[in-house]
Image: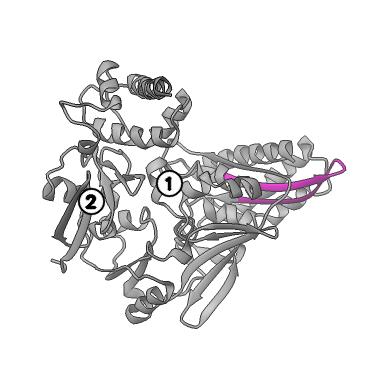
Amino acid sequence: MGKKMQIALTVNGEAHDLLAEPRELLIYVLRERLNLTGPHAGCETSHCGACTIEMNGKSVKSCTVFAAQANGATITTIEGLGSPDSLSVLQQSFREHHGLQCGYCTPGMITRAHRLLQENPDPTEEEVRFGISGNLCRCTGYQNIVKAILAAAATINGAKEAAE
Amino acid sequence: MIAAAFEYHRPADLKGALGVLAEYGDDARVLAGGHSLIPMMKLRMAAVGHLVDLQDIADLRGIRVADGRVKIGAMTTQHEMIASADLAGAAPIIAEAAVQIADPQVRYMGTVGGNVANGDPGNDMPGLMQCLDATFTLVGPDGSREVAARDFYHSAYVTAREDGEILTQISFAAPKGGYAYEKQKRKIGDYATAACAVQLTKAGGKVTSAAIAMTNLSDTPVFSDAAGAALVGTSGDAAAVKAAVTAAVAAINPTGDNRGPAEFKRHIAGIIIGRAITRALSRA
C-alpha cells in the first residue's frame, strides 16, 4: 500500500474530500468512492472511451488519470448532465434516434458529445464522426449515434434561435 | 491494471520540479499529459518511485509567435496546438500532424513536450520537429541548454536528455512554402504504419529548399538530407519526386510488428512519402 493523500474534487457541482492513494485511477474514485457508476471501466487502456468524463472543460478518459492528478479538478459525469426525470437534450435525442443498443458506451458517448457541441455547436456529420472517434460502440455501427448528436445540435440551435 | 505505488509531487514551479529530480535521481520521472507514461506504469513496464506532475507550472504552457520564431511550451496540449490561430498562421503543419494523433480525449491531455521527450519512435512530433529543424530547450541543475531535434534521438526511448533535466520548450523558425504531414495508420488511435513530414519552398518554378522526415520507420525518427537534396533545383516533376522517395526509403530501417512485415512498411513508406511531397509541392 502506498501512502494516501487528501484529494479534493468538485463533481457535478458537489465538493468532495477523500483519502486515496495517488495511484488510484480516477474512474475508480468516481465509481467506487462516489458511487457514480455512469462512467464505465471498459478497456482500461484509454482506447474505448466508456470512462469518458469532463475534467476542467476537457473530455478525458478517466482510466488514464491518477487520482492525484485530479486533485483540485472540476468534473462532470453523465450523472451531472441529466437525470431520468429530466433528460438533457442529448440524452433525449439518443433515446429518440435509438443511439444505443446495449448502452455500455452511452454515458461516455454522451459526455463526449456534450463537450463536442460546446466547442462546435453546429458540426457536420464528418465532424461528429471525428469528434467521437475516441469512443467505441460495438452495437450500433454509429449510424444512430451520429444522427442523435446531429439532431441534438439542431434542437439546441433551434431553441437558441427561437429565444433570440 | 494498477500501477505500482509511487509518491506524488506537484511542484508549483520549474525550480521545485528540478529539486525533486535532483533529490531522487532516476527514481523520479516527470508527468506531462500522462497518456504515454500512465499506460506504461499500469502495465508495470515503467517503475516510478516519485512522480513529478508538471501541470501547475504555468511557465511551461503557451504558444508564442514573434519575429518569425515559434516557441511552444512543453506542457502545451495537442488540442491547444490544433486550436491555436497563431500556430495555424505560422506553422500549419503542426495542426495537420496533431489532429492525426490518437483521438480527441487523448489530444486534450497529451502534450507536445511529452510527445517529443518520450523518445517513442511511434510518436509523431519528433519527426515533425526534425523536419522543422526545431530546437529543444532542456533545463537541468546546471542551467539550460539547447539541442537540435535532429540530434536529440539516439535510439528508442534513449535521447540526449539527461536524468535530472526537463524539456521545457520547443522552438523553430516559422516555416515558409508548402507543407504536408501524411500518416498511414490502421485505425484512429493507432501509431503510424508510416508517416512523413515535408516542408519545402519554391521560387521561379524550382524547389529551393526541402526538408523531409519520417515517423515510426526506424527506432528513431529519420531525417533524410538526401531526400531533400533530390528535390532542390528541380521543378518537382515526377522524376524528382521519385528520386526523393527512393532516397528517403533508403534511410529507413523498419522492423516487422503487428502493423506488418518490414517489406510491407517500406512499400507503405514509399507511398506516404510520395504523397507528402506531392501535397507539399501543390501548396508551395
Q: Relative to residue B173, is residue B156 drawn left or right?
A: left
Q: Give the range drawn in magenta.
A: B195-213
Residue furthest out toward the front: A164
Instruction: Report helix, strand or loop for mark 1.
Output: helix
Q: In which quarter of the image is residue A38?
A: top left
Q: Residue furthest bottom?
A: B142
B197 falls in the magenta region:
yes
Q: Which of A92 and A28 is in front in this view?
A: A92
For the residue carrying disc 2, how many other residues have a C-alpha within 10 Å: few (<14), some (14-19), or many (20+)?
A: some
Q: Position of residue B197 (x, y in %)?
A: 61, 47
Name the residue beneath numbered marker 1: B107
Q: Which of marks 2 and 1 is in front?
A: 2
Give the residue displayed 20% in from the left and 57% down from the top: A24
Viewer-nearest residue: B95 or A153? A153
Secondary element at image label 2? strand
Are dots 2 and 1 on a single chain?
no
**Amino acid marked by disc 2:** Thr
The answer for which chain carries disc 1 is B
Q: Can residue B90 be seen in this view?
A: yes
Q: Name the residue under label 2.
A: A10
- The residue drawn where x is 60% and y is 45% is B88
Badge number at residue B125: none
**In the image, is residue B110 above or below residue A119?**
below
